[in-house]
Amino acid sequence: QVQLVESGGGSVQAGGSLRLSCAASGDLYCIAAMGWYRQAPGKERELVAVHITAGDTTNYGDSAKGRFTISRDNSKNMLYLQMNNLKPEDTGVYYCNLVPCGPYEYWGQGTEVAVSS
């Protein structure tokens, strides 16, 4: 079992910044990837950014490229998302995701981000 707890969400004006954090605990023996997803009101959950353990690579959703940075601190079992130049369309609930080497994946409960114009 894995537990994920997000923090760092809040309300910010357009152009501002936020840093999201995700604390992971539990069976962290083998992690294939960790990432951030968001769900805007009335929309499906979408990929924001993902860090893939193999190759230490990162991938970003189109809306996040150039503005958001994902990082991972394995020594602290933490995942971060630095979000700069936020836009109203970035509003939503941001979820931390962990994909272990096995068949399951885990989700946090989410942290809300609200960006006003």
Image: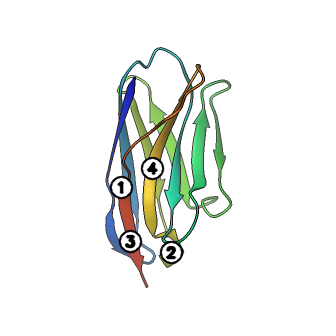
Q: Earlier in the sequence, mark 1 or mark 2?
A: 2
Residue at image mark 4: 95
Up/down of 54 relative to 80, above or below? above
Q: Secondary structure at mark 4?
A: strand
Q: Amino acid at mark 2?
A: Lys
Mark 3 and mark 4 in contact? Answer it, CB < 8 Å: no
Q: Earlier in the sequence, mark 4 or mark 2?
A: 2
Q: Count residues near mark 4 (Cα–Cα under 10 Å), then give few for <14, some for 14-19, many for 20+.
A: many
Residue at image mark 1: 111
Circle 1 or circle 2, nearest the eye: 1
Q: Secondary structure at mark 3?
A: strand
User: Mark on residue 87?
Assistant: 2
Point 51% across, 57% down: residue: 38
Point 64% across, 58% down: residue: 65
- Distance between the alpha carbons at the discs numbered 1 and 2: 17 Å
- Distance between the alpha carbons at the discs numbered 4 and 2: 18 Å
Q: Nearer the viewer, residue 34 or 104?
A: 104
User: How far from the left and from the top, in percent, is residue 107?
Assistant: 45, 40
Up/down of 101 relative to 58, above or below? above
